[in-house]
């Protein structure tokens, strides 16, 4: 072997040892750097003509394990999703408060009914009346506050989605740009590990927002897809996401899609391509869990109000009020009267509580009896006029803009008026008595419909102006936007015409589902697919008969029921004058009509208190499938379900956090810096450097000896 060969071997050893020491130095300097991946480089022998000519450093790479990386990315996405879910659910649960807190919604409801029970024992107590009304107002306000806060939380989730979308775009851009850097460096044989480490950090950050699947490119860099296969980056190209958060959020808000503009120019909805990540968790809360809780909350508060109104309408203040004015039913007079059965009595009373006149109405036979006289018939299609004729001026019935009212004459001792259902065969339409159906003596009022069983059939007039528009937004079961349908009310006037228009496959919703009208007049939409498509209403300029509710309000479309809590208030007339609180029952059997209404009678107060344990038919709402229950039981179920949701979310969060910790630890063990290992490498390469130096020194000495020999 020549001296030049020995010298070259020594020099190659020095250079290789220097390269390895530089790598060890970088690794040790970044031992505590989050996300840092250990660098490695394998030495390679230099062979020329079958003769060893020293060593050289191999390509510098990262000690990355693609399988452990994939597991860590998946665990990161799942953990971020469950963390976002728990965080928002915990906020929702906290709104209901601790069950031992007197300000808890359900305790406020109990306090309201307890106050009514106290009034049943002492109906003349002015302080008791004020307390009961205050408790009821607080209960309704608390229901409204929680419902509003749930919408605020949904709005916060929506805003965070917008922020996350911007972050995803920035990360995809950075990852894609690093692809170009890594590829160009790799092609020329350079060290791309710094760029690769930075890129890996970006990918880890991206996995928190949405689920990603990574594949390595042959020339360096990566290709990213979602777990469903949607392409996110490829070389220097990348997809971009766009989303505009809603300006304001309530139960009926229609959210726009998160649009993905793909690398090849295609457009997709991100919701169809997500399986985990923070955005997925935010979407689930915003579009599914929070609306479900809100829907059940509104059903509870609405049914509470309905049962209070049922008891209040069956009672009267003492003295009886001069007039009773109902709510806007959005019905015509003929529609409102149709379907009633049983008997009710319109009673006029003096200021001292004596009955002056009675008019018993039998809806089953379409007859009335005035002051116990002979029965006479009335025409249901001309109800108000016929009844006014029968009352003979003692009181006046009126129906205008969908609202019924009755007013005592104010003369001849006819100072007040009350509506009393028959004890054996009470008036009934869709489970409500005459007074309750029209809201003539409601204690809790609403400016929108609170029941959606309209009583209309296919041949009835739909009541909406032809050409007026309802804007439907259609989403898939996964939450992606499918279409926007601007539905125009057809020219045909019947409910069947309206149904046919809604189910039209060209101008209506027929491509996405079917509308149907059941026997009670409830209009519902059943979407196609599994999970089924859903609809929301983004705009509605319809008005029934010009003064009534819109089509979506009248039929309760697009989770309109989820807004009811914000419309329920204690009747202003009663708040202004608590003596109008109906705490007594009219005794139609009083001898000679004397003393039929007594201020000391608290039977009405006891009826109000009894609604807690009255069997009520609840509608399907949120996580509750509906059916018969009591207000007290339903409230307990609601509290339990919200608590279970939060507890399940907490358990999922903890479980996924543990899985992430395990995956991260295994990944760090495989590709992180181990100081002991690096110290061994440091010692090894220092010794190699020293040995190479000695070899060069030996070659030098030999050169010197040869030179001295030839002198």
Image (spheres, rainbow, N blue to C red):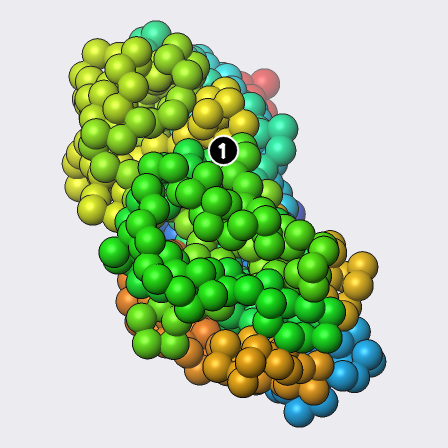
Foreground residue among 218 and 302: 302
Residue 410 visible in the shown view:
yes
Query: In the orientation shown, which residue stands out farthest toward the bottom?
Result: 121
Foreground residue among 582 and 656: 582
- Residue 296: which quarter of the image? bottom left
Q: Residues within 10 Å of mark 1 (few under 14, many from 20)?
A: many
- Residue 141: which quarter of the image? bottom right
Q: Quadrant of the C terminus?
A: top right
Q: Position of residue 468 (x, y in %)?
A: 43, 14
Tell me which residue sits at (57%, 78%) in the image.
593
Q: Quadrant of the N terminus?
A: top left
Tell me which residue sits at (55%, 41%) in the image.
398
Residue 116 vs residue 304: left or right?
A: right
Query: In the orientation shown, which residue stands out farthest toward the top?
Result: 265
Label total for image: 1
Tell me which residue sits at (52%, 39%) in the image.
399
Foreground residue among 62 and 108: 108
Q: Position of residue 618 (x, y in %)?
A: 36, 64
Q: Is residue 700 above or below residue 339?
A: above
Residue 45 visible in the shown view:
no
Q: Position of residue 454 (x, y in %)?
A: 35, 43
Q: Position of residue 473 (x, y in %)?
A: 38, 25
Provide the secondary structure element on which disc 1 rests.
Answer: loop
Q: What residue is pinned by disc 1?
A: 549
Tell me which residue sits at (31%, 23%) in the image.
482
Residue 536 vs residue 250: left or right?
A: left
């Amino acid at each position: 072997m020549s001296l030049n060969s020995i010298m070259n071997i020594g020099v190659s050893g020095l250079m290789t040892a220097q390269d390895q020491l530089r790598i060890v130095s970088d690794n040790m300097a970044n031992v505590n750097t989050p996300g840092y991946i250990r660098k490695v480089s394998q030495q390679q022998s230099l062979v020329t003509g079958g003769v060893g000519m020293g060593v050289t450093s191999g390509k510098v790479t990262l000690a990355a394990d693609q399988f452990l990386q994939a597991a860590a990315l998946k665990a990161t996405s799942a953990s971020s999703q469950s963390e976002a879910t728990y965080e928002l659910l915990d906020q929702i649960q906290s709104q209901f408060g601790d069950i031992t807190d007197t300000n808890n919604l359900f305790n406020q409801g109990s306090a309201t009914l307890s106050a009514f029970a106290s009034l049943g024992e002492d109906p003349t107590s002015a302080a008791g009346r004020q307390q009961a009304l205050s408790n009821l107002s607080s209960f309704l306000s608390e229901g409204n506050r929680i419902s509003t806060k749930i919408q605020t939380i949904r709005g916060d989730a929506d805003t965070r989605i917008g922020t996350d979308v911007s972050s995803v775009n920035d990360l995809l851009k950075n990852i894609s740009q690093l692809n170009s850097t890594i590829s160009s460096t790799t092609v020329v044989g350079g060290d791309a590990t710094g760029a690769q480490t930075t890129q890996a950090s970006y990918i880890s950050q991206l996995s928190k927002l949405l689920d990603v699947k990574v594949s390595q490119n042959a020339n360096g860099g990566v290709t990213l897809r979602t777990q469903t296969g949607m392409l996110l980056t490829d070389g220097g190209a990348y997809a971009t996401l766009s989303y505009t958060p809603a300006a304001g959020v309530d139960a009926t808000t229609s959210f726009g899609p998160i649009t993905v503009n793909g690398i090849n120019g295609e457009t997709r909805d991100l919701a169809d391509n997500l399986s985990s990540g923070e955005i997925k968790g935010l979407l689930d809360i915003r579009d599914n869990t929070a609306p479900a809780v809100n829907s059940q909350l509104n059903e509870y508060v609405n049914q509470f109000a309905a049962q209070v109104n049922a008891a209040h309408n069956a009672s009267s203040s003492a003295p009886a009020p001069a007039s009773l004015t109902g709510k806007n039913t959005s019905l015509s007079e003929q529609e409102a009267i149709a379907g009633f059965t049983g008997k009710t009595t319109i009673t006029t009373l003096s200021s001292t509580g004596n009955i002056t006149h009675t008019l018993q109405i039998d809806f089953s036979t379409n007859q009335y009896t005035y002051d116990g006289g002979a029965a006479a018939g009335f025409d249901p299609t001309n109800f108000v006029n016929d009844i006014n004729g029968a009352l003979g001026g003692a009181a006046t019935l009126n129906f205008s803009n969908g609202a019924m009212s009755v007013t005592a004459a104010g003369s001849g001792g006819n100072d007040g008026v009350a509506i009393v259902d028959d004890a054996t065969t009470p008036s009934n339409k869709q489970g409500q008595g005459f007074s309750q159906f029209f809201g003539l003596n409601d204690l809790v009022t609403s400016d929108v419909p609170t029941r959606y069983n309209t009583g209309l059939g296919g041949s009835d007039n739909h009541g909406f102006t032809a050409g007026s528009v309802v804007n439907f937004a259609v989403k898939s079961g996964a939450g992606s936007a499918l279409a926007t349908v601007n539905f125009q009310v057809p020219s045909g006037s019947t409910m069947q015409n309206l149904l046919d228009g809604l189910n039209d496959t060209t101008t209506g919703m027929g491509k996405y589902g079917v509308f149907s009208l059941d026997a009670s007049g409830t209009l519902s939409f059943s979407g196609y697919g599994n999970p089924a498509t859903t609809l929301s209403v983004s705009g509605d300029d319809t008005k029934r008969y010009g003064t009534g509710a819109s089509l979506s309000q009248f039929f309760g479309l697009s989770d309109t029921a989820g807004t009811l809590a914000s419309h329920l208030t204690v009747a202003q007339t009663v708040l202004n004058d608590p003596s109008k609180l109906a705490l007594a029952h009219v005794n139609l059997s009083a001898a000679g009509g004397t003393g039929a209404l007594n201020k000391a009678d608290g039977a009405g107060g006891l009826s109000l208190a009894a609604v807690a344990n009255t069997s009520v038919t609840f509608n399907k709402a949120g996580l509750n499938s509906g059916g018969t229950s009591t207000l007290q039981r339903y409230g307990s179920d609601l509290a339990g379900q919200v608590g279970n949701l939060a507890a399940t979310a907490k358990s999922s969060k903890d479980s996924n956090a543990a899985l992430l910790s395990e995956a991260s630890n295994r990944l760090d063990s495989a590709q992180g810096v181990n100081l002991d290992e690096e110290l061994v490498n440091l010692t090894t390469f220092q010794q190699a450097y020293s040995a190479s130096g000695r070899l060069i020194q030996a070659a030098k000495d030999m050169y010197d000896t040869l030179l001295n020999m030839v002198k």
